[in-house]
Image (spheres, rainbow, N blue to C red):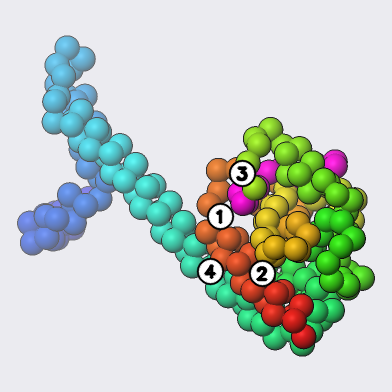
Amino acid sequence: MSDGLEQDIRDRLLASPQDLLADRDVMRALVATHEAETGDNVIDIRGRAMQALEARLNRLEATHESVIAAAYDNQSGVAIVHRAVLALMESDDMADLIGRLQSDIAPLLRIETLRLVVEGTGGPQWPEDTLITPEGAIDSIIQAGRRTPRGDDIVLRPALVLTRPLHGRTVGSEALLPLDLGAGMPRAILLMGSADASRFMPAHGTDLLRFFAQVFRMVLLDRLKR
C-alpha cells in the first residue's frame, strides 16, 4: 500500500472515527488481531465484552424485526376483516347473505371454506346454502377437540375428520365461531376452514374473528326480519 493511500485512510479515520466503530467486521478483526498478539494465556475482557454486546444487539434486532412483522400482520388482518364486513353489509336478503359466505367472503378472508351451520329444523326457513345438522350435533363438533370450551368460546384447531363433510373438502385448520341468535332460535356456528394447517391455532388471538362473528350475527338477524 502506497504512503499516499495510507495517509488518506488515516486522515479519513481521524476525521470520522465513528465509521470505524460502526463497522462490526472491522472491529471484530481488530479485536481478533489484538487477542492474537496478547497470547493464549491472556484474556482480553474488552474483547469478550464486545462479543457479548454484539450478541445482545443481534437479539434486539431480531426482536425488533419480529415486532414490526407482527404489527404489519395485525394491520393487514384488520383490513381483511373490514373488507369482509363491508361485503356482509352489502347483502340484499337472507339468501344473498348466506350465498356470499362461500363465494365472496371466504376469498376476502383468504380461507377456503366459510359456512353457516344451524342445528335442527326449527326456526326460520334457511337458504339452501345453510348447513343443517341434527339436534346436539354442534356440541359434538365443538367438543371433538382436546379442549372443551365454554359455549361462547371461539375454537381454533387443526381440522378434524368429523367436520370434513361440513367443509366439503380437506382443510388443514378450522375455526368455529358460535352465534347466539336469541331465544327461540336454533343453535348456530360459523365454520371457517383453511388449507394452511397453521392458520387457525389454539394459541392465536381471536379478537378479529369475534368482531367478524358479532357483525355477521347482527346482519343475519336483520336479514331474518325482512
Q: Which residue is mark 2?
A: 217
In the rendered structure, are the residues bearing label 3 and label 2 in contact, judged by CB atoms less than 8 Å apart?
A: no
Give the spatial CA distance, label 2 vs label 4.
Answer: 19 Å
Distance between the alpha carbons at the discs numbered 3 and 4: 26 Å
Task: Name the residue that disc number 1 marks.
Answer: 206
Marks 3 and 2, how far apart at CA: 19 Å
Instruction: Provide residue 131's location: percent of width, then percent of height.
Output: 87, 61
Q: Residues within 10 Å of mark 2 (few under 14, many from 20)?
A: some
Tags 2 and 4 in contact by the CB under 8 Å rule? no
Q: Which of the marked residues, 1 or 3, is nearer the chain's N terminus?
A: 3
Q: Which mark is residue 78?
A: 4
Q: Position of residue 76 (x, y in %)?
A: 54, 68
Residue at the spot of label 3: 150
Q: Type of residue at label 3? A: Arg
Q: Are marks 4 and 1 in contact (CB under 8 Å)?
A: no
Of callouts 2 and 4, which one flags the residue occurring earlier in the amino acid sequence? 4
What residue is drawn where x is 25% and y is 50%? Answer: 23
| Image location (x, y in percent) of residue 1 | 22, 50
What residue type is disc 4 on?
Answer: Val
Kindly report the distance in space between the C-alpha atoms of the residues bearing marks 1 and 3: 14 Å
| Residue stretch rendered in magenta on the structure | 152-162
Instruction: Give the image location of residue 140, x and y in percent.
Output: 79, 41
Which residue in the rendered view is the most extreme toward the front?
184
Which is nearer the N-term, disc 4 or disc 1?
A: 4
